[in-house]
Amino acid sequence: MGWFQLDGPTGIWRCTPASAQPERAEAAPPLTGTTAALRALLHPADAARPPLFVGRVRGTSEPLRTRFRLIDADGVVHHITAAATVRHDPTGQLIDAVGVYLDRVSAAHPTPALSDVIRDRATIEQAKGMLMLIYRLDADQAFAVLRELSQHGNIKLRILARQIVTDFRALPHTDAALADPHAYTELLRTIHLRAAPPITEETFRSGPTRLAQPHES
């Protein structure tokens, strides 16, 4: 079980890591995140089903109870049950929402802190954005490339994304131009050699996603 609070004026969420022992959750240092960051972690089926818990607290003064799913950077689904009370000022503006939540995954197995999950997701989004820019892909296509590279190389998505960001940043470039376009493709073809865990050439024989060469400017 963990505790959470939404600050109305700032839109910042604070929560404690979920723990099977309530006193530990209460004593743990709080984690922070924005509503946008929490929405990014929502399971697609829950994100598409209005009204979302993270969007309802501003329109009601009734106690809220809800269930939803979050997906962390490793693809683990967290089944969240939450309950909260909300306060508004005389003009109807939200003061705060305070409640508790139960993470059925973390109750049975240790899981990363929410701050780590949010940071990992930000790295994945950064790597996806790089692929979109270099290869002129849309968001879905870029994520499909990441997923296929992850599967072919047997590399966790968050580790793969971190390696892509590191490798691409290390390439020589100027403020006005990217590096040699072919250099990015070569880095992706060999990324399994640098990202953990190591895999054999036999595992990677089929090769990662066959990308077209980036458009040269």
Image (tube, grey):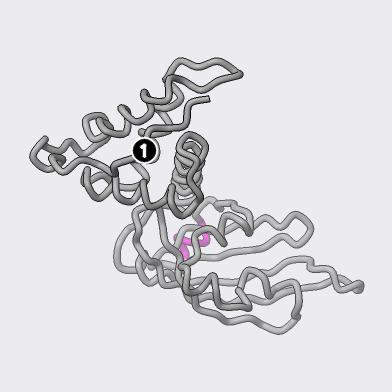
From the viewer's side, name the closer residue of 133 and 45.
Answer: 133
Find residue 113 and report its horizontal and vertical position in percent. 44, 52
Instruction: Please determine whether, in this image, residue 141 is positioned above or below residue 21.
Output: above
**23 relative position to 199: left or right:** right
Task: Identify the residue shown where x is 86% and y is 73%.
Answer: 92
Task: Identify the residue shown where x is 15% and y is 38%.
Answer: 199
From the viewer's side, name the closer residue of 128 and 89.
Answer: 128
Find residue 73 and report its horizontal and vertical position in percent. 40, 52
Task: Identify the residue shown where x is 39% and y is 40%.
Answer: 161
Extreme-left residue of the structure: 202
Extreme-bottom residue of the structure: 62
From the viewer's side, name the closer residue of 139 and 2.
Answer: 139
Find residue 7 and report its horizontal and vertical position in percent. 72, 60
Q: Which residue is mark 1?
A: 212
**191 relative position to 9: left or right:** left
Residue 24 belongs to magenta span = yes
**194 relative position to 22: left or right:** left
Mark 1 lies on a secondary structure that is: loop
Task: Identify the residue shown where x is 34% and y is 61%.
Answer: 76
Mark 1 Cα within 10 Å, few/some/many (few <14, many 20+)?
few
Q: Which residues are magenta?
A: 23-27
Find residue 74 and report its horizontal and vertical position in percent. 34, 53
- Main SS class of the magenta portion in the image: helix
Quarter holding the N terminus is bottom left
Label tally = 1
Question: Mark 1 belongs to which amino acid?
Answer: Ala
Residue 56 belongs to magenta span = no
The quadrant holding residue 83 is bottom right
The quadrant holding residue 65 is bottom right
Instruction: Please determine whether, in this image, residue 41 is positioned above or below residue 94.
Output: above
